[in-house]
Image (cartoon, rainbow, N blue to C red):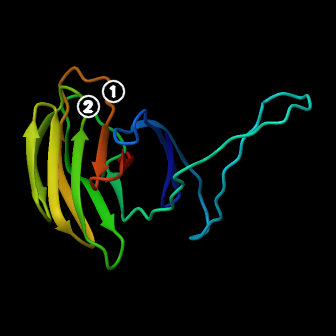
């Protein structure tokens, strides 16, 4: 199984053995894409000779993704022992739609999470993660938190996923 999703200007590819559990493969952001786009399926033999290639595609569907999630970090860099206030994950749900949103936000390991707040739903700190659930959400909802870097911090990497129960993809931004 293969799945390609478009969220804004980001294209996300995933694969699955059973069509139920999806594994992230890659994402690519292309600026200035129009709001609408044509789509299709292609196949190639990847050779320079005249081999004919044939494939059968079944169960092809076109579905609208109803949300996008972006991370907003209000400062450009961190120093050891420094605090950063007001880091956000903003989830935008398409006008007129509602969604049950689940977010797992993972700041750099060992950094201290504090002051977790949401505009909708509930959030909990679980180890090095923030788990946020907002059922029946609409419009733009936000998760806001503060971080303190360890005194010996050299660098940090964020990760995280957002899901509506059908689609799961990495949180954009950083």
Does residue 19 lie above or below 88 as drawn? above
**Residue 93, horizontal then vertical, whole percent:** 32, 68
**Residue 57, horizontal then vertical, whole percent:** 61, 47
Q: What element carries label 1?
A: loop
Mark number displayed over residue 141: none
Q: Quadrant of the C terminus?
A: top left
**Residue 69, horizontal then vertical, whole percent:** 34, 56
Of the pair 56 and 139, the residue shown nearer to us: 56
**Residue 151, horizontal then vertical, whole percent:** 18, 24
User: Closer to the observer: label 1 or label 2?
Assistant: 2
Of the pair 9 and 53, the residue shown nearer to us: 53
Q: Which of marks 1 and 2 is nearer the N terminus?
A: 2
- For mark 1, does the 10 Å Cα neighbourhood hold few (<14), some (14 to 19), or many (20 or more) residues? few
Residue at horizontal 25 percent and vertical 24 percent from the top: 153
Q: In this view, does 78 lie to the left or right of 145?
A: right
Q: Is residue 64 left or right of residue 47?
A: left
Mark number displayed over residue 108: 2
Does residue 15 lie above or below 153 as drawn? below
Task: Residue lying at the far right in this picture: please name it.
Answer: 50
Mark number displayed over residue 155: 1
Of the pair 86 and 42, the residue shown nearer to us: 42
Answer with the quarter of the image where residue 98 lies: bottom left
Residue at horizontal 61 percent and vertical 63 percent from the top: 33
Q: What element carries label 2?
A: loop
């Amino acid at each position: 199984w293969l799945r390609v999703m478009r969220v804004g200007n980001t294209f996300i590819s995933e694969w699955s053995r059973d069509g139920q559990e999806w594994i992230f493969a890659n994402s690519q952001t292309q600026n200035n894409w129009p709001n609408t786009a044509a789509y299709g399926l292609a196949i190639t033999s990847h050779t320079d000779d005249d081999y004919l290639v044939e494939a059968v595609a079944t169960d092809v569907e076109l579905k609208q993704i109803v949300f996008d999630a972006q991370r907003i970090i209000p400062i450009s860099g961190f120093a050891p022992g420094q605090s950063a206030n007001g880091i956000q994950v903003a989830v935008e749900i398409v006008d007129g739609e509602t969604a049950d949103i689940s977010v797992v936000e993972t700041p750099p390991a060992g950094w201290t999470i504090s002051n977790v707040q949401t505009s909708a739903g509930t959030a909990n700190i679980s180890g090095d993660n923030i788990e946020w659930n907002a059922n029946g959400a609409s419009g733009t909802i936000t998760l806001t938190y503060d971080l303190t870097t360890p005194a010996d911090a050299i660098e940090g990497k964020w990760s995280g996923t957002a899901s509506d129960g059908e689609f799961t993809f990495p949180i954009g931004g950083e």
